[in-house]
């Protein structure tokens, strides 16, 4: 079945540093990947839609310069939190959509918990 | 715009009993898909069941079934024979089929606790 690997699962960084989170589709080519953010005990909020080979589409209110998304290949999308601040601490989770048949269901990575000190 | 509403922040159920988690939705898309995901404390999102808006029959997947009432715009999840391992957050979600925007829109979630 479709497997999405997300790394790192947990990261702690100092305020002002940048953190990169990787999302890989292991056994299928992902034409589109989605990045979500989840605050404790809250729902998942869509941050951006990432399409291979083109610029990401950001949701209203999401700073594109702070949350850099790169979808360099059909199996890898990265989210870089630049100049991280404590308010960026959150659970970030990606999902990937395979092309063709089976495109209805999105497969999620296991998530990355970011703590900014 | 799409909106998912889950009105039950928390639910309790006895082990081996059935439980229904409510979900209503609103959309202007003529064609759409409805999903349920389970999120245990580890954080991963586990796909449970899918219902297409034009599917004639309600979806079933093992102990999970989706009670789809299109006229009422509801897509309730029924879990039969609850198990302790079913304790988790459950999210209802939807996405339009015929639009370029194919991200999932999630409800606020229901925390299910299965009691022995």
Image (cartoon, coloured by chain):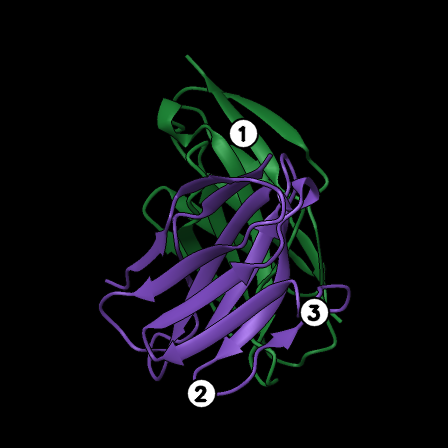
Chain colours: A purple, B green
- Could you classify mark 3 by the number of other residues whose Cα lies within 10 Å: few (under 14), some (14-19), or many (20 or more)? few
- Residue A82 vs A73, above or below: the answer is above
Spatial CA distance of label 2 from label 3 is 19 Å
Q: Are marks 2 and 3 on the same chain?
A: yes
Marked residue chain, label 3: A
- Decide if residue A78 is on the left or right side of residue B76: left
Give coordinates of residue B102: x percent, y percent: 56, 75
Residue B89 at least partly seen: yes
| Closest to the observer, A71 or B27 | A71
Question: What residue sits 34% from the left and 79% below the top?
Answer: A74
User: Residue at left 38%, top 48%?
Assistant: A8
Which numbered disc covers residue A59? Answer: 3
Residue B8 vertical position relative to residue A34 in the rendered view, above or below: above
- Tell me the quadrant of the picture where the C terminus of chain A can be found: top right
- Quick one: quadrant of the N terminus of chain A? bottom left
Quarter location, residue B11: top right
Q: Is disc 2 placed on a helix, strand or loop? A: loop
Mark 1 — residue? B112
Q: Nearer the viewer, mark 2 or mark 3?
A: 2
- Disc 1: which chain? B
Mark 2 packing: few (<14 Cα in 10 Å), some, or many (20+)? few
The chain to which mark 2 is attached is A
Instruction: Judge from the rendering whether residue B85 lies leftward or rightward of residue A56; answer left or right.
Output: left
**Camera-side mark, 3 or 1:** 3
Q: Residue under circle 2?
A: A53
Instruction: Point out the residue furthest to the top here.
Output: B116
Judge by depth and name the residue closer to the eye, B6 or A45.
A45
The relative height of residue B59 versus residue B38 in the rendered view (above or below) is below
């Amino acid at each position: 079945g479709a497997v999405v690997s997300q790394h790192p699962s947990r990261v702690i960084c100092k305020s002002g540093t940048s953190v990169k989170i990787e999302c890989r589709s292991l056994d299928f080519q992902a034409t589109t990947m989605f990045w979500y953010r989840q605050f404790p005990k809250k729902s998942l909020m869509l941050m951006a839609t990432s399409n291979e080979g083109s610029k990401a589409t950001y949701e209203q209110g999401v700073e594109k310069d702070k949350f850099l998304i790169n979808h360099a290949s059909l199996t890898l999308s990265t989210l870089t939190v630049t100049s991280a601040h404590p308010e960026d601490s959150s659970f970030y989770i990606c999902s990937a959509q395979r092309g063709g048949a089976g495109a209805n269901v999105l497969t999620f990575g296991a998530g990355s918990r970011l703590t900014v000190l | 715009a799409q909106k998912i509403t889950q009105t039950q922040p928390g639910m309790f159920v006895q082990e081996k009993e059935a439980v229904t988690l409510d979900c209503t939705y609103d959309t202007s898309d003529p064609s759409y898909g409805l999903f349920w995901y389970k999120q245990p404390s580890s954080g991963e999102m586990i796909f449970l069941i899918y219902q297409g808006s034009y599917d004639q029959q309600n979806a079933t997947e093992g102990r999970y079934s989706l009670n789809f009432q299109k006229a009422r715009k509801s897509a309730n999840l029924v879990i039969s024979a609850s198990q302790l391992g079913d304790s988790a957050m459950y999210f209802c979600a939807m996405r339009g089929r015929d639009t370029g925007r194919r991200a999932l829109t999630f409800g606020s979630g229901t925390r299910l606790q299965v009691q022995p």
